[in-house]
Amino acid sequence: MQSSIDYGYPWWLSYGHLVVFFPALGAAALTYGKRRWLFILALTFTIWSAAAFCVMRFVINVNGEPELPTQAFLRSGTGRVLDLGAGTGRSAIMVLKARPQATLVASDQFGDSFDHHFGHTDTPQLPIANNLKAAGVDTRATIATADMRKLPFEPASFDAVVSAYAIDHLNRQGSIQALAEAHRVLKPNGDLLLMLVENDGWARFAFGPALSHGGTRGATWWRDRIRDSGFNLVEEGYKPLTLYLLAHKK
Ligand SMILES: C[S@@+](CC[C@H](N)C(=O)[O-])C[C@H]1O[C@@H](n2cnc3c(N)ncnc32)[C@H](O)[C@@H]1O
């Protein structure tokens, strides 16, 4: 069993720009004082790839610990939380560490989308189980295999629902179904926290147009669907690569 956390996002998300950086640096060194325009081009790529590497590794840091974007989520500090699309446990551990009195059900379909992000394994529940244990929060968590569009949980059985970079993997219809399911399983006044990929300046700088994600659906679409699903939107904001929306079940 592993002793440290490994969220399993692909290496190139954190280190891919170094594949450009080193050759560009070499080209800049070779052309320095000889071929002015090639040198300027190589230097531009060297500076951009170094800066983009820093953005991905230290600002966005997909394999690092995320912070709860708002302290208003589960302000009471206690209760039962459902994580929709928990993956390898990054969002579940974020909540369990920020709310040490809470318990959490980490649910995921553990299907094609999981394989797409983290690679195929015959036991896709194992990485999250290992990470929860490595983070020291496993005694407050259970893992459930579930499609967020049709949840196997009783109505009004959770105090809060979180979904980080997961609900926006569904198409429009799927997202609406998942919001309806989140509403059904939440207790009245329960919190819903959505963290969605936002194609912000950091992402555009690092990836240019290469990043295409549900984030392109836009904040207005999510605000409207959240309200249509029976929630009051109480807070929204931005973190690097992230739009977050906090809502209460009416
Ligand atoms: C990018 S990962 C996010 C994982 C985690 N929340 C995090 O913050 O790192 C998206 C996850 O959503 C899950 N997912 C996609 N569609 C799903 C569905 N219909 N029901 C449940 N989980 C789903 C995938 O299996 C994947 O683990």
Image (spheres, grey):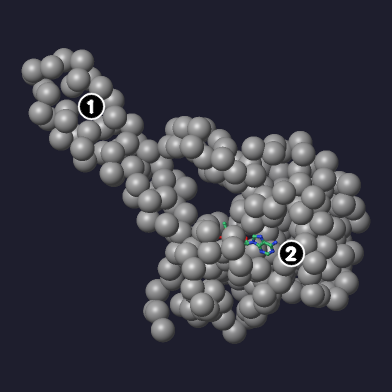
Q: Secondary structure at mark 2?
A: loop
**Ligand 1 lies in which image quarter?**
bottom right
State whether label 1 is within 8 Å of ligand 1.
no
Query: What's the residue type where badge 1 is placed?
Result: Ala
Q: Is residue 126 above or below residue 228?
A: below
The quarter holding residue 21 reads top left
Q: Extreme top residue here?
A: 36
Q: Is residue 47 above or below residue 8?
A: above
Q: Position of residue 189 (x, y in %)?
A: 86, 61
What amino acid is labelled 2 in the image?
A: Met
Left or right of 249? Residue 148 is left
At 8% from the left and 18% from the top, the residue drawn is 33
Q: Are marks 1 and 2 in contact (CB under 8 Å)?
A: no
Mark 1 to mark 2 CA distance (whole Å): 47 Å
Question: Tag on residue 148?
Answer: 2
Dot 1 corresponds to which residue?
42
> Residue 110 location, x and y as percent?
61, 69
Which image quadrant: the N terminus?
bottom left
Image quarter of the C terminus = bottom right
Q: Residue sitting at 64 percent across and 78 percent down?
A: 143
